Image: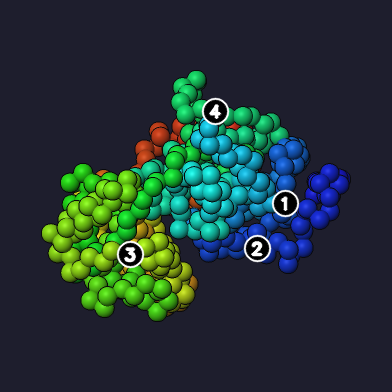
């Protein structure tokens, strides 16, 4: 019997098909740390034609395929839970085009988000989606998970910036979806359907995103709040008064305390919580806009408003913000980060409930996130052995209570991390059986044998 991996080696070259245990180790896990799932092989594709070859042979031999970019996902979307092969696009790093006239960029899926941002800004343009992992997450993964980030409050998430893409289905059929024009309503919006499909419909080989002119001025400040509930009220007040910062972030005391030792920005000792606000727009209006937003925070009890003096000051603030999640992981034996979303008016209540859940389950909670659009990263932390049945039961109960609280407040299970394997069991809490069944039908339409990224999104 012919070994399909040997066939792939012949077509692509032996160095492109990894099979040793040592070489496969990085592809058996991802940033979610939800387990180790060794694949039978990992294939390092460098072109659309190679993706077609892999998906054709995999379909012929009924081999499960797990697409993978940088492996930076938080819900296990890149884990090969059914074995088979990992199809990696990490080598597909070309920025094909940055067009100022058409206001678009065309990239391969392995392009790092920060590299696209830099290329756009070098041309006086701007690509807004900015996940916290922007320095190492890839555009293919951003599209698969519909990634967000701090600037999503004003500018939207990856779906709002994706105009078109080239995708290959199981079996090797390739389609060009979408457009490169600012507007277009021809037929169904299949591009929007594929964005956020978590690699379960097809594998992307090229992505077209829109760009806008780079904002002329940016103003950033932090409001030092007495506690997280007051910070939540300040966020709601800023939105209620009609202000539209490009970022509106919140950090509670636990998040602040964990990052202090590494922070390039020194948070005040009395900070019970922080609201980080960033605006952009016309240079002449920036100072007044910052003062107005700052005064809203003062009305909600801010002890101090600290304005970034220049770009270097602003970068120190954001570098500190992006250190929060790694600092929490390093400080505790076990960390799981959820990314629930609640209506902005319910932020303060969700923060209160998260603290109650932590106390009830005897677990530390640290919450931060993109509070402007209600997207909160509630982190469950412990130094106990999380594999101990009693501890594991408390963690599971805490997660369930967090999700129930978010849903009770009119929210949703995920704002940007996706479902993957981490939240599949909870899908039925938010969506009806009929809605889930129709999504399963869509999956089978694109992938009848259910070989592409199997085991994700839907509970089995």
**Residue 406 vs residue 188: left or right?**
left
SS at circle 3 = loop
Q: Position of residue 388 (x, y in %)?
A: 45, 74
Reply above or below: 55 against 328: above
Reply above or below: 176 against 421: above
From the viewer's perspective, is the residue at label 4 or at label 2 nearer?
Answer: 4
Q: Residue at x 50, y 35 (%)?
A: 103
> What separation in Å lies between label 1 and label 4 (alpha carbons)?
28 Å
SS at circle 4 = loop
**Residue at the left extreme?**
299
Q: Position of residue 20 (x, y in %)?
A: 77, 63
SS at circle 1 = strand
Q: Looking at the rendered structure, which numbered label has been put on residue 309? A: 3
Q: Earlier in the sequence, mark 3 or mark 4?
A: 4
- Nearer to me, 154 or 47: 154
SS at circle 2 = helix
Q: Are the residues flagged by discs 2 and 1 in contact, CB closer than 8 Å?
A: no
Q: Are the residues flagged by discs 4 and 2 in contact, CB closer than 8 Å?
A: no
Q: Residue at x 66, y 46 (%)?
A: 94
> What separation in Å lies between label 3 and label 4 (alpha carbons)?
41 Å
> What separation in Å lies between label 3 and label 1 (alpha carbons)?
45 Å
Q: Which residue is mark 4?
A: 179
Q: Residue at x 45, y 58 (%)?
A: 132
Q: Looking at the rendered structure, which numbered label has been put on residue 26? A: 2
From the viewer's perspective, is the residue at label 2 or at label 3 nearer?
Answer: 3
């Amino acid at each position: 019997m012919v070994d399909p991996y040997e066939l792939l080696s012949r077509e692509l070259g032996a160095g492109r098909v990894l099979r040793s245990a040592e070489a496969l180790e990085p592809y058996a896990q991802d940033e979610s740390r939800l387990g180790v799932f060794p694949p039978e092989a990992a294939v390092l594709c460098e072109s659309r034609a190679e993706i077609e070859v892999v998906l054709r042979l995999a379909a012929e031999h009924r081999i499960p395929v797990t697409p993978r970019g940088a492996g930076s996902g938080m819900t296990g979307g890149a884990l090969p839970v059914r074995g088979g092969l990992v199809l990696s696009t990490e080598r597909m790093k070309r920025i094909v085009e940055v067009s100022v006239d058409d206001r678009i960029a065309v990239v391969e899926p392995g392009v790092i988000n920060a590299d696209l941002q830099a290329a756009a800004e070098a041309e006086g343009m701007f690509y807004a989606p900015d996940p916290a992992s922007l320095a190492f997450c890839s555009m293919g993964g951003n599209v698969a998970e519909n990634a967000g980030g701090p600037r999503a409050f004003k500018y939207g998430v990856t779906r709002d910036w994706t105009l078109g893409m080239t995708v290959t289905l199981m079996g090797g059929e390739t389609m060009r979806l979408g457009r490169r024009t600012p507007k277009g309503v021809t037929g169904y919006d299949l591009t929007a359907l594929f964005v956020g499909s978590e690699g379960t419909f097809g594998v992307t080989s090229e992505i077209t995103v829109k760009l806008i002119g780079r904002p002329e001025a940016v103003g950033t400040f932090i409001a030092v709040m007495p506690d997280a509930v007051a910070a939540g009220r300040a966020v709601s007040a800023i939105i209620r008064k009609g202000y539209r910062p490009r970022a509106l972030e919140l950090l509670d005391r636990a998040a602040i305390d964990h990052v202090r030792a590494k922070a390039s920005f020194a948070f005040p000792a009395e900070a019970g919580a922080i609201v980080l606000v960033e605006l952009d727009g016309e240079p002449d209006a920036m100072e007044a806009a910052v003062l107005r937003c700052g005064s809203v925070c003062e009305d909600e009890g801010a002890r101090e408003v600290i304005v970034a003096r220049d770009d270097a000051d602003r970068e120190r603030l954001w570098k500190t913000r992006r250190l929060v999640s790694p600092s929490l992981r390093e400080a505790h034996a076990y960390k799981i980060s959820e990314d629930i979303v609640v209506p902005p008016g319910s932020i303060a209540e969700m923060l209160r409930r998260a603290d109650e859940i932590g106390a009830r389950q005897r677990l530390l909670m640290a919450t931060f996130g993109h509070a402007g659009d209600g997207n909160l990263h509630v982190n469950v932390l412990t130094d106990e052995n999380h594999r101990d049945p009693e501890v594991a039961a408390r963690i599971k109960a805490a997660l369930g209570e967090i999700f129930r609280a978010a849903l009770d407040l009119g929210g949703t299970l995920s704002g940007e991390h996706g479902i993957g394997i981490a939240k599949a069991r909870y899908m039925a809490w938010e969506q009806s059986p009929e809605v889930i069944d129709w999504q399963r039908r869509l999956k089978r339409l694109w992938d009848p044998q259910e070989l592409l990224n199997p085991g994700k999104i839907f509970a089995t």
